[in-house]
Image (spheres, helix red, strand yellow):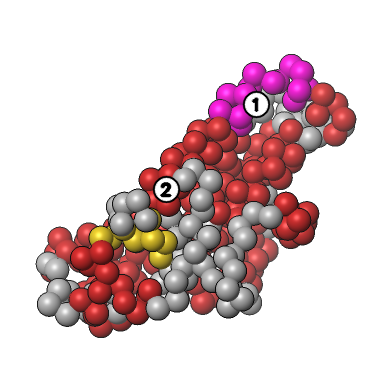
Amino acid sequence: FGIGLDQASALRIFLEDRGQFFFFNEKKQQYFSKWGIVSALLFTPPLLADEMFFGIHTDFSKPEKILHSAMYTDSLIFFLNLYNLGLGILVVFYLLRIAQLYTQSIGVAYFFVLCSIYGTFLWHYLRGQSLEIFQVLFFLGLAYHLILFLRSRQTTSPKWPQLLQAVAFAGLLATLKPLFVLLFPWLWIFSVAAPGKDGSWLRGTLDAVGADWKHYALWLALPTLATALIGMGLNDYQFGSPFETGYSQLNTGREVPYIRFSISFLPVAMKGYL
């Protein structure tokens, strides 16, 4: 909810490079994390658990250590590791469920999960605390629920709540990094222009804009609009404008601000998600 100037000394090592970690709201005279409030909320469970069972360990008489590695006590590290273990289990769950969508062999599914963990960079996210494990989890959730919805489109009973869950995961990703809002155009394209009951892409698209438009309005359009309004509201609260993403104060070293959403970057960025 913002850090006042009277507490700025605690952020000293993070404020040396303007805009790298925090955004300064001139109107409120407060610092806000440029990665958004959800990134902070995701790490509150282990912090609250540590405070509940062992009390506050931080020495507030030395503000320069408040956000330094020295604040990590054995108990806090324990709760962070326990929390990360739970997140890792969720990641494994989604990996296994996705694998089972493409093979009936449980052995092949387990082999895929093991290869994903130990044969990719995912291992580094599972063994230590990082924001990336949330990104992996949300991406897996988005993919899994979108696949379930797309497959159900080819039946007489589409699973519309699965589409809503996919939108929810995309929204969570957008609250972590503004660039992830570019997931929504692809989410719309893949969910609308999908094969219908007869397996035809054209027929499925016509049904989406015809007979099924009310369902898409309820399960896709309204959640997307709600996500956009929430995101813009958070931007306005933290950064002073609905269209400010927190990156404008980041200096590139060329004495020019970092350009967040230049139209010229969109084709390359959209292609990158494919």
Q: Which secondary structure, mark 2? A: loop
Classify residue 48 by image quadrant.
bottom left
Q: Which residue is mark 2?
A: 240
Q: Position of residue 150 (x, y in %)?
A: 71, 38
Q: Position of residue 30 (x, y in %)?
A: 31, 58
Residue at the spot 21% in from the left edge and 65% down from the top edge: 6
Q: Which residue is mark 1?
A: 216
Examine the rendering and report whether any part of residue 258 can be seen: yes
Disc 1 marks which amino acid?
Tyr
Decide whether residue 217 is among the magenta residues. yes
- From the image, state whether disc 2 or disc 1 is nearer to you: 2
Highlighted range, magenta? 207-222
- C-beta proximity under 8 Å, tags 2 and 1: no
Classify residue 58 by image quadrant.
bottom left
Disc 2 marks which amino acid?
Gly
Classify residue 31 by image quadrant.
bottom left
Q: Position of residue 55 (x, y in %)?
A: 12, 67
Nearer to me, 190 or 161 = 190
